[in-house]
Amino acid sequence: MGAKAPAKVIVPRGGPPAGWSATPTPIRTPTTATATPASTVPAAGVTPPAGGLCPTSQLAVRSAGGEGAAGSTYENLVLTNIGTTSCAVRGFPGVSYLDAAGRQVGAAAVRSGPAGSTVRLAPGALATATLRTVHPGIQEGCTEPGQSTPVAALRIFPPANTTALRLTLPGVSACSSPTVQQLSVAAFTR
């Protein structure tokens, strides 16, 4: 008989990596755009990532370059290494909308494109990931009044982290249904 096929890996659709606790935790409103803490505890038997990956505490997030196109907006989520040592990011952020109380609104972002390669970040260096947002009123399940709701922020889990950053969104609404896929995100690149 031939070699046994490798086990199939199931990748989550946004949010923290598979195997981590997905219990939502309220996020405090930050005083600056270098938001933090919404931490969760790793599930039993799961070891936090090692090898120089950037912890959330060493990162800040901002949005840049928003452009609209046929019912969607594309913007870059920019991570900056605010620490004093180099670190790395690889892969996709977990992204979802939050209401003013810190609860998730709608579906988390799906991953779009290849996982990419490791991006080394010296202190002050940047990595970007493109986020596509479909505007409310475009997709089935979000065309009627009452199917969208105001949101206060994006919750962004850097790759391999279970602590989120928060990016404030003034005056934005999103589809409230968890079955409407309104967010998609690419992997981080230089």
Image: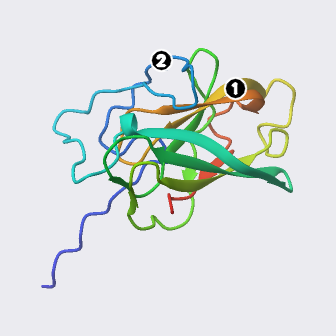
Q: Mark 2 highlights which residue?
A: 26
- Between 51 and 177, the one lying in front of the other is 51
Image point 47% across, 53% down: which residue? 125
Q: Is residue 94 left or right of residue 150?
A: left
Q: CA distance from mark 1 to mark 2?
A: 15 Å
Q: Secondary structure at mark 2?
A: loop
Measuring from the top left, give residue 179's x and y in whole percent: 64, 39
Q: Amino acid at mark 2?
A: Pro
Q: Is residue 3 left or right of residue 133?
A: left
For residue 142, say whether it is visible: yes
Measuring from the top left, give residue 81's x and y in whole percent: 43, 46
Q: Mark 1 highlights which residue?
A: 151
Q: Quadrant of residue 177?
A: top right
Dot placed on the residue nearer the N-terminal end, 1 or 2: 2
Q: Amino acid at mark 1?
A: Val
- Between 119 and 70, the one lying in front of the other is 119
Image point 87% across, 26% down: which residue? 145
Q: Is residue 51 above or below residue 167?
A: below
Q: Is residue 63 left or right of residue 39?
A: right
The crowding category of the residue bearing disc 1, from other C-alpha atoms within 10 Å (few below 14, some 14 to 19, many at least 20), is many
Q: Is residue 181 left or right of residue 48?
A: right
Q: Is residue 56 above or below residue 81?
A: above
The crowding category of the residue bearing disc 2, from other C-alpha atoms within 10 Å (few below 14, some 14 to 19, many at least 20), is some
